[in-house]
Image (cartoon, grey):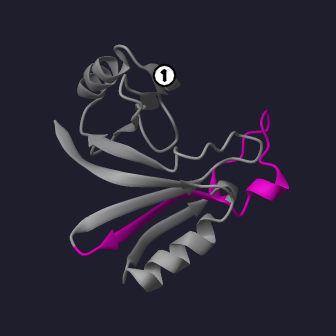
Amino acid sequence: MILGISPYLVTNGNGQEAVKFYESALDAEVLGLQTFGDMPEDPNHPTPEEAKNRVLHANLKIGNTTLMLSDTFPGQPYNLGDQVTIAIMINNVEKAKEVFGKLEDGGKVQMPLQETFWSPAYGQVTDKFGITWQVSTEVNQ
């Protein structure tokens, strides 16, 4: 079942500043903020020092709406026009695979649907209309 969708902003290294700005400008409540430095360390792919304070994921509540935000990883492309994506939360892996496959039809996979440390199935796909979707599975343990 699809749980909901949220706008997801992508910033280029100034995510912490953006979170503070939206917190003030939009009376946002910061529900959570993780940096790349907060990720579990992978000895095969250590997090570079310049990435550690960048925002991996921020979750803000504005009224009855959730706004999500993250920075690009250093060295990753940042393209004007790609600053806003849509996050879609789904409550089971099979439904996530189904939705991802349908969005992929005629589109382009940015990150294959895969297990991550925060989700059993997460991926990014740009659909045939040029809209980028972040498909994330949230399974209650």
Whether 52 is drawn above or below 63: the answer is above
In the rendered view, does 10 fall on the left or right side of 48?
Answer: left
Whether 103 is drawn above or below 117: the answer is above
Front in this rendered view, residue 43 or 31:
31
Q: Residue 49's image quarter?
A: bottom right
Report the residue that reaches farthest toward the top: 106
Q: Residue 107's image quarter?
A: top left
In the rendered view, does 11 fall on the left or right side of 66?
Answer: right
Query: What residue does disc 1 label?
Result: 109
In the rendered view, does 136 fall on the left or right side of 32?
Answer: left
Whether 43 is drawn above or below 13: the answer is above
Q: Residue 59's image quarter?
A: bottom left
Please say whether residue 138 is visible from this viewpoint: no
Answer whether residue 10 is magenta in the image.
no
In the rendered view, does 15 fall on the left or right side of 75?
Answer: left
Please state, as top left, top right, bottom left or bottom right, where the N terminus lies in the image.
top left
Check disc 1: other Cα within 10 Å, few if <14, some if 14-19, many if 20+. some
At horizontal 37% and vertical 80% (from top left) the residue drawn is 26
The boundaries of the magenta stretch are 38-63
Please say whether residue 22 is visible from this viewpoint: yes
Q: Identify which amino acid the numbered label 1 is placed on.
A: Val
At horizontal 47% and vertical 26% (from top left) the residue drawn is 114
At horizontal 70% and vertical 58% (from top left) the residue drawn is 37
Front in this rendered view, residue 107 or 137:
107
Answer whether residue 59 is magenta in the image.
yes
Check disc 1 and report its element: helix, strand or loop. strand
Q: Position of residue 34 (x, y in %)?
A: 56, 61
Q: Position of residue 44 (x, y in %)?
A: 79, 33
Please state, as top left, top right, bottom left or bottom right, where the C terminus lies in the image.
top left
